[in-house]
Image: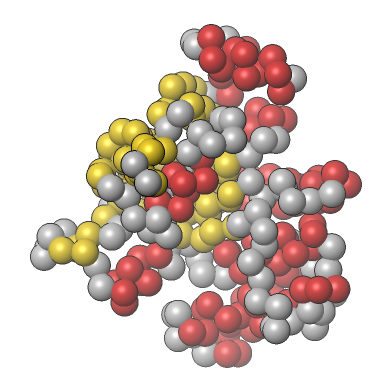
Amino acid sequence: MPAVNIRKLSKSFDGVEVLRDIDLVVNKGEVVSVLGSSGSGKSTMLRCINWLEEPDRGSIHIAGQRIGINEQTRRKMTSKELATLRARTGMVFQGFNLWPHLNVIQNVMESPIYVKRMPKDQARAIAVELLEKVGLADKHEAYPFTLSGGQKQRVAIARALAMSPEVILFDEPTSALDPERVGEVLQVMKNLSSEGYTMIVVTHEMEFARAVSDQVVFLDKGRIIEKAPPAKFFSNPDTERVRRFLEITA
């Protein structure tokens, strides 16, 4: 059973179709890098996967369960149903989205406690382990405003992992970082890949996509125009559009 199965996904804003008939299957343990120019629909696709944006058409299944629609009643999910299924996806935003009034360990503990009703002691133990995993064992009591961009993003990754998601969605996780901080975040993501986490990564980091991905997907004007393993995608793309993109970003 795929971790994520997208069929005929389409989405418009103000009459402009930004996603058009997207089909994508992501198997458990795979890393899929999503490339494309600004405005090609990459972030919108991610936001539709966890229903932060409601698609106009199509279906999305997370580990076999359709998100957004209750397949028994054929009606839209209630807020409670949607929250339960959305918890199976972790989202890491380019702008971090940490809670500024909570310290680092509280940021990681918050969702397991209030969404999963996890006991605080258990949530804290998980948070301690995850902060060590992302290299922030010494920052438990720090507040977000005291952290570098790379540290904030690593807290955001730990927060996503705390929910034990089926898939982690990364929306350009290094785009807001100073160049010297990019490497520390990419290294954490590479470590997660080696541990078998399922990841969909919207990124401009070509070397990361080449080294870590199982599939590379290219969006152009809301359509997937190419999908291939990285060896083929980067060395012998099928479309002239991708060839031009790779020449520009080389």
Task: Work out whether residue 250 can be spotted.
Answer: yes
- Residue at the extreme front of the image, as rendered: 14
Q: Looking at the picture, how far across and down is residue 135, in whole percent?
A: 79, 63
Q: Is residue 127 above or below residue 242?
A: below
Which quadrant is the C terminus positioned in?
Answer: top right
| Residue depicted at x 44% and y 80% | 116
| Residue depicted at x 45% and y 80% | 115
Query: Nearest the camera: 106 or 165?
Result: 106
Q: Which color mode does the image show?
A: secondary structure
Q: Looking at the picture, how far across and down is residue 210, in whole percent?
A: 65, 28
| Residue depicted at x 69% and y 83% | 102
Residue 165 in the figure: left or right of residue 185: left
Task: Work out whether residue 135 can be spotted.
Answer: no
Q: Is residue 119 above or below residue 14?
A: below
Residue 146 in the figure: left or right of residue 110: right
**Residue 132 lies in what quarter of the image?**
bottom right
- Residue at the extreme bottom of the image, as rendered: 120
| Residue depicted at x 52% and y 90% | 119
Query: Nearest the camera: 5 or 193?
Result: 5
Q: Looking at the picture, how far across and down is residue 134, in whole percent?
A: 74, 61
Q: Looking at the picture, how far across and down is residue 167, in whole percent?
A: 48, 54
Q: Is residue 123 above or below residue 189?
A: below
Query: Number of callouts in the render?
Result: 0
**Residue 133 lies in what quarter of the image?**
bottom right
- Residue at the extreme left of the image, as rendered: 73
Query: Nearest the camera: 16 or 134?
Result: 16
Q: Is residue 184 above or below residue 162?
A: above
